[in-house]
Image (cartoon, coloured by chain):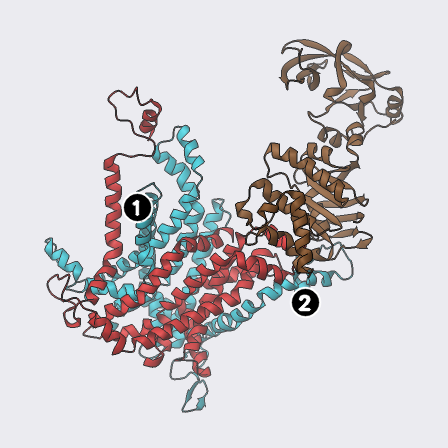
Amino acid sequence: MARVVFDNASRIFPGSTKPAVDALNLDIPDGEFLVLVGPSGCGKSTSLRMLAGLEDIDGGRILIGDRDVTHVAPKERDIAMVFQNYALYPHMTVRENMGFALKLAKIPKEEIKRRVDEAAQILDLTEYLERKPKALSGGQRQRVAMGRAIVREPQVFLMDEPLSNLDAKLRVQTRTQIAQLQHRLGTTTVYVTHDQTEAMTMGDRVAVLKDGLLQQVDTPRNLYDHPDNVFVAGFIGSPAMNLIEVPLIAEGVRLGTADVSVPREVLSAAASKGLKSVIFGFRPEDTTLGEGGVPITVDAVESTGSDAYVYGHVDIPGGTQHEVVIRADGRIPPRAGDTISAVITEDHMHLFDPSSEQRVEA
Amino acid sequence: MSAVAADPSAGIPEAKKPGRLKRSWDRYWYAWAFITPVVLVMLVIILWPLIQGVFLSFTDATERNVAKVIGGRQIPATYDVVGLKNYVTVLTSSTFWVIFARTVVWTFVNVFFHFTIGMILAIVLNRTLRGRSLYRALLIVPWAVPAFVSTYMWRLMLTDTGLVNSVFTAVGLPSVPWLSDTNWLFISCILVNIWLGVPFMMVALLGGLQSIPTELYEAAEVDGATPWQRFRFVTMPGLRTVAATVILLGSIWTFNMFAIIYLMAAQGQRNDIATLPVFAYDLAFTGIRQYAMSSTYGVLILSILLVFAVFYKRALAKQGEVW
Amino acid sequence: MSAETVVHEVSVGEASGKKVRRRDQRSPLASFALHFGLFIALIWSLVPPIWALLTSLKPNDRAITTQLVVFDNPSMDNYKFVLTQTDLPTWFLNSVIVAAFTMLIGLFLSATAGYAVSRFRFPGHKQLMWSFLVTQMFPMAILIVPIYNIFARLGLLNSLAGLVIAYCTTAVPFCAWMLKGYFDTIPIEIDEAGRIDGLTPFGTFWRLVMPLARPGLAVTAFYTFLTAWGEVAYATAFLTSDAKKTLAVGLQSFVGQFKTEWGYLTAAGILVTIPAVIVFLLVQRNLVAGLTAGGTKG
């Protein structure tokens, strides 16, 4: 078990000038479950592979347990990895697959058997130990891949989208199992996914990447409540946060024809930066229907049973419109064509600088 | 280490860290170790003879003046470098151009029939059909028979009183001098080579057909495409890569085909049906051994093939084929 | 086909008088045409070997007659003759030796290189791939003369070892090319998993990739074997003594300037062909995949 540090770690692919991972700084304390999340091509898998030693590091350092592993071969790093397609050895049985690394490390046979049996017990694989991967279902293969990582008792687990080949239901189940298992073993884990729900539900902390740059790293709650910039605000949460560029006025902002009052401290922070307008953000769930709110024309309503998501628009004087989404009670949803008034909860408003796209903090 | 320094992608230019060379050596040394045996062998048994061959084509080497061992005594080579003389001689002789034209005809006709027949058979075999795998296995037999045996099998059937002429006579057709007349002999060679080459095309194209997803056909059908349109807009684009590859391979193999022409003809006839490789071989190993001339032909043949391959690749690239 | 689709959509009960044909069925006439076409193709493919087989069973001096005779006192006499009275067994053995060694050396040398070009993007990668490709274009005509002269100096003419070396000029790049195609089909994550599990690059190659590429290795091996088995040009030029000849050269001695010993020739030809055909039918399916894969992913 160990702390993992990315210290200005960069990766530039040969033939490219733009770094795939640009000076990444991350400090992952011992035992933490850290999730790397971002859209495809953001560098999250590359970062993980740099940590694994499968990708060269062109700048900066990587530490595992206070040891500089920047130029250390994968096998010397004391890590285990779960691959997206599992990468089970097709010509070996489940037992051989799980014990292979131990065998290479010249661990005594009885010890290997004990550890494999134990892992198989935990993962409910005991009856499949003598089968080849071909004879297993997708979920079982996924568990074998997990088992292969567990038996090594490494300092760090690396997981590269390990759930993306499972069907939706199994994915939700396995998600909890992995999180529980990690808590039980207490092994530092770096987990890559493109799915923000997976990130939010599994991670102790979540690191959001975009274009090779770290956007924010924080607990799921803080990411949700205090996104550092427009990208994180839009990426975390589903449906996504409404983000609209609006002019600043004395008490707040003007959204369409309505004046929305904004907490004084935030407003003065914005004013002190000399901003004339801001990107105003609010989540669909941070609204209530009631008098004196922002008038919204309803275009469509999507009901999930418990909730209804109202897709509508705000008319801006001058003829333009802004799409917005708000959440309403699923039992008495508005209808398309209605005009409703949405009150935005003052505590959950987000203001961003339109030029830097950074959060305006009180 | 100099090889490392020569590589532009071995490290990023800005990173002026010491040990960069060491690191790219660390990164690649095993790749180079993996290829070393092959590279060494290819240098010794391919590149070295190739250089010698090119060199010989600039000399007047024949069996009389090359280095040899007679009765344990080393006799040194006495041939001279004559520059481009051989090339001038060859390229200004009508012999070369006649044989070149014949080789082009040989290659084109053969590959055309290989591809067309192979394609038809592949399409038929790609349908659900009773006994399909048996048909497939039996149709492959000509590929499996060694070329020299095939040639004898056909010679047996094509002799003046052989099976083919017997059948011809039986149905009232005139018998054909398949082997005795050199024009017919050339046609016979083509016949044998077609027989030999169709199975490869068939199997390759069948593989290509089977790799086209069924959904594409279903989508086309739902979109209202006729069978011809499905062939035109689903099958043909789907086969492009495979077809491009097999036509290139087939052309090169056919161009270089030796056994059939060499073994079909009696010695006296060979000059009249020889393609470039056979002619070059005969220059070196039949009658007075004209090594220099043969090498000149060899270099020309290789150049022709390379030019063909480059143009072929360009043509494909122009149509957006990543290959 | 569109007509068939329409028919298919009408339920069976409603199809008044019109015959209902399921999607995967075709008319008897079309079926007959297909089978008839295939039958013609079969005749075309199989008559030469069958006729050779029949001829090999006839008495040697009556192999070719003016009338069409299918059976004429069938016997194994020609086979007995070529196996006992000629050098055929020696040639056979020589061919096996040459082909086997070509195969082993070709595979052994090229496997690691095929793996390297499939997996690593090292400086020189492109040039190596390119040289594998170009050497396959090499006409025998450009190498045979210099190799002949080099061998003459080294005393390697008229020796099986020399012939193996000559065959390696095509076998080595060919095997590397084929194997590269097969290695490409093994997911690279397998290698990465192996590296994380503690294997060296050599260990990954030897313990993971080679076992997984076994079908590809087998196909490449057989094909290399058969290519050497049937090679004519080098063998004819290099081998001069009866004791050293391979089948491709030896069989030429049954073909005289004026008279061909058809009975013996066909018997020998059948003996040469049978093992080749059996091997071929076993591996052909995988063969083409390998040949064209190298080209498309190159």
Chain drawn cyan in the picture: B
Please state which amino acid type lies under the numbered disc 1.
Answer: Gly
Task: Kindly report the distance in space between the C-alpha atoms of the residues bearing marks 1 and 2.
Answer: 61 Å
Residue B162's quadrant in the figure?
bottom left
Residue C167's quadrant in the figure?
bottom left
Residue C148 spot, x, y in % from top left = 42, 77
Tell me the crowding category of disc 2: few under 14, some 14 to 19, or many 20 or more residues within 10 angstroms, Cα based. Answer: few
Q: Which residue is mark 2?
A: B2
Residue A236's quadrant in the figure?
top right
Q: Vertically, is C30 above or below B76?
A: above
Which residue appears at 12% of the width and 61% of the height?
A: C68
Number of labels in the image equals 2
Please state which amino acid type lies under the numbered disc 2.
Answer: Ser
Task: Please tell me which residue lies in front, A116 or C146.
Answer: A116
Q: Vertically, is A171 above or below C127?
A: above
Chain drawn brown in the picture: A
Name the chain under label 2.
Answer: B
Q: Colour of chain C?
A: red
Task: Please tell me which residue lies in front, A218 or B322.
Answer: A218
B227 on left or right of C42: right
Nearest to viewer (mark 1 / mark 2): 1
Which residue appears at 44% of the width and 59% of the height?
A: C219
Q: Which residue is mark 1?
A: B131
User: Mark 1: which secondary structure?
Assistant: loop
Closer to the chain start, of discs 1 and 2, is 2
